[in-house]
Amino acid sequence: MFFEFFTWWYGKGWLEAWLRIRQWITKVQLEFSIPVLLHTLFSPWKQIISFPGRSLGDKFRAALDNLVSRCVGFMVRLMVLITAVLLTVVAGLLGLVIAIAWPFVPAAFIFCLYGALR
């Protein structure tokens, strides 16, 4: 059983640790819907738009309202995109640290056990 554990740990287990990095990054990207955010970056916020009236003042007011709605939509989506990129980087780095530390965990366990019993 001891040999099987090490065979799994340094074989299939380590490969799964590397594959988990991609899963974490993909999950973050799907949770934030990055392609949708990029596609709708300049769309009005919550599709709030004003329709112009007949007078020049109404048309100007509608254009200004629509511009403000697009600016708000852009800023909110940009903040969400920045957050998504940061969390993607964090997920990648955390996964990389785990995958690199993976082979040292059994040795660290034995070292800590030896230190505790000493």
Image: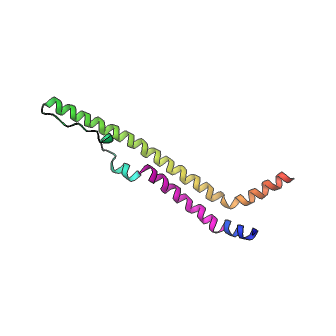
Q: Quadrant of the N terminus?
A: bottom right
Left or right: residue 64 versus residue 8 is left
Residue farthest toward the right in the current orientation of the protein: 118
Question: Residue 90 versus residue 62: which sits nearer the camera?
Answer: 62
Instruction: Indicate whether residue 35 is drawn in magenta.
Output: no
Left or right: residue 37 versus residue 20 is left
Residue depicted at x 39% and y 43%: 78
Residue depicted at x 69% and y 70%: 7
Q: Position of residue 93 (x, y in %)?
A: 56, 52
- Colouring convention used in this rendered image of the protein: rainbow
Tell me if residue 41 comes above or below residue 10 in the rendering. Answer: above
Left or right: residue 23 versus residue 57 is right
Q: Position of residue 37 (x, y in %)?
A: 37, 48
Helix, strand or loop: magenta stretch? helix
* Span of residues in magenta: 10-33
Residue depicted at x 63% and y 58%: 100
Instruction: Indicate whether residue 19 is drawn in magenta.
Output: yes
Residue farthest toward the left in the current orientation of the protein: 54
Q: Position of residue 117 (x, y in %)?
A: 85, 53
